[in-house]
């Protein structure tokens, strides 16, 4: 085989990319077999033109650290009809609630949530009929206090169930449900937040205040990025997120949307459609956007035989080789490259290969 030192016209050294282009897009990393070609040293016969490094097991990958923003989309779902002083707050922001959950108390009287399309608007007592009565009966059935039909007729059996419910709540069992006792929302269970600027301990309510907002199953997640950073995050890029309480979450890049400040917001979704935050979504505060430290994996880490990218030679036929101390060429396949290092196949472990002396 010809000595590579005398084949300058046909073999050119591949130098590592400049610092500003060290990070390669993940989609182009795996299976990459080409290389950028530069002019070889002027005198390849000069022994000082080379140094030697050992091919060894290692890992090659690349990432950048950015913030991920998590925020909830709040939708008004219910109003308060109780009048008096707020004496306690009984739910946490973003808590998932079910039928019968006590939200807060006014003058020590519990305000309870229930499911129903018709908002509470009047007191309910024996002899009344209507859709709101049927909603009350459904609540009492869910709580195991009523076994009759939810037919919208407030009969004696409904009165008995209401009295039993009132005893459980610790209020006078008079069989009358005041308009402010229940807040009906369209769907349960759901995550809720109280408007704490209105409903807070000691606040005085007059009735009619929009105090309840509903939350989706999980907050939205996006990564604010510059144009250059966003270019490193094509669809499918993995983003590893540190949750508020040390949780480890994983999202993948999806759509990119530019805002009025020229910031590109890279939207994230869960892996294979799963939730990003899973059972820990309640850890994300409801009131303001939350900034979470994240690692954007621009080149997925690959383990294998590692060499400096400067050791790679591109031949005229398009193949890539490395050259050992004796001048023997090994045709190799480049699996991935990042930050001046490459994982290769086709050369024995511990082989010492040439690297231009000016290379890294």
Image: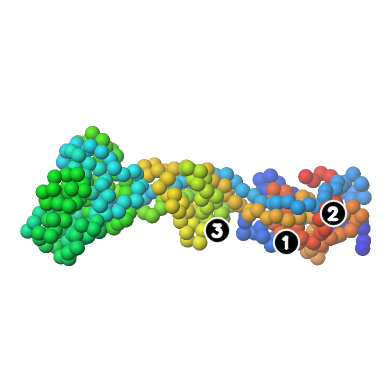
Tag 1 residue: 33
Residue 270, x across and y down, in percent: 49, 57
SS of the residue under disc 2? loop
To which quarter of the image does residue 209 belong? top left
* Dot placed on the residue nearer the N-terminal end, 2 or 3: 3
- Label 2, label 3: how far apart the Cα atoms are: 36 Å
Residue nearer the viewer, 138 or 335: 138
Tag 2 residue: 351
The image shows residue 277, relative to residue 345, as above or below, that is: above
Residue at x 17% of width, y 64% of height? 148
Residue 268, x across and y down, in percent: 49, 54
Tag 3 residue: 236
- Label 1, label 2: how far apart the Cα atoms are: 21 Å
Q: Quadrant of the N terminus?
A: bottom right
Asked if residue 200 lies left or right of residue 359, the reply is left
Regarding residue 151, the answer to whether it shows in the image is yes
To which quarter of the image does residue 37 belong? bottom right
| Label at residue 199 | none
SS of the residue under disc 3? loop
Residue nearer the viewer, 38 or 4: 4
Residue 123, x across and y down, in percent: 12, 51
Asked if residue 266 lies left or right of residue 136, the reply is right
Residue at x 12% of width, y 51% of height? 175
Q: Nearer the viewer, mark 1 or mark 2?
A: 2
Residue nearer the viewer, 38 or 161: 161
């Amino acid at each position: 085989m010809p000595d590579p030192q005398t084949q300058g016209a046909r073999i050119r050294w591949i130098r590592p990319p400049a610092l500003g282009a060290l990070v390669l897009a993940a989609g182009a990393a795996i299976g990459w077999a080409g290389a950028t070609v530069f002019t070889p040293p002027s005198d390849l016969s000069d022994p000082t033109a080379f140094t030697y490094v050992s091919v060894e097991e290692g890992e090659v990958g690349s990432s950048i650290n950015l913030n991920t923003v998590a925020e909830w989309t709040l939708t008004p779902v219910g109003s308060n009809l109780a009048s008096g002083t707020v004496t306690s707050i009984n739910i946490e922001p973003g808590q998932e609630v079910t039928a019968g959950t006590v939200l807060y108390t006014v003058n020590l009287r519990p305000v309870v949530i229930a499911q129903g399309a018709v908002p509470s608007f009047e007191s309910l007592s024996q002899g009344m009929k209507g859709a709101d009565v049927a909603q009350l009966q459904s609540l009492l059935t869910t709580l195991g206090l009523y076994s009759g039909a939810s037919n919208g007729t407030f009969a004696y059996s409904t009165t008995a169930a209401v009295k039993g419910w009132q005893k459980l709540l610790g209020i006078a069992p008079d069989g009358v449900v005041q308009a402010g006792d229940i807040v009906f929302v369209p769907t349960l269970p759901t995550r809720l937040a109280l408007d704490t600027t209105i409903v807070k301990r000691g606040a005085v309510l007059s009735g009619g205040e929009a105090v309840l907002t509903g939350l989706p199953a999980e907050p939205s997640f996006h990564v604010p990025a510059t144009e250059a950073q966003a270019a490193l995050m094509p669809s499918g890029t993995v983003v590893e997120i540190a949750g508020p309480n040390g949780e480890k979450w994983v999202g993948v890049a999806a759509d990119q949307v530019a805002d009025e400040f020229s910031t590109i917001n890279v939207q994230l979704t869960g892996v294979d459609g799963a939730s990003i935050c899973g059972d820990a979504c309640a850890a994300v505060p409801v009131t303001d956007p939350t900034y979470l430290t994240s690692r954007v994996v621009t080149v997925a880490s690959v383990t294998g035989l590692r060499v400096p990218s400067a050791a790679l030679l591109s031949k005229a036929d398009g193949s890539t080789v490395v050259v050992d101390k004796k001048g023997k060429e090994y045709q190799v396949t480049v699996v991935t490259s990042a930050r001046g290092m490459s994982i290769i196949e086709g050369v024995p472990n511990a082989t010492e290969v040439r690297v231009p002396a000016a290379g890294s």
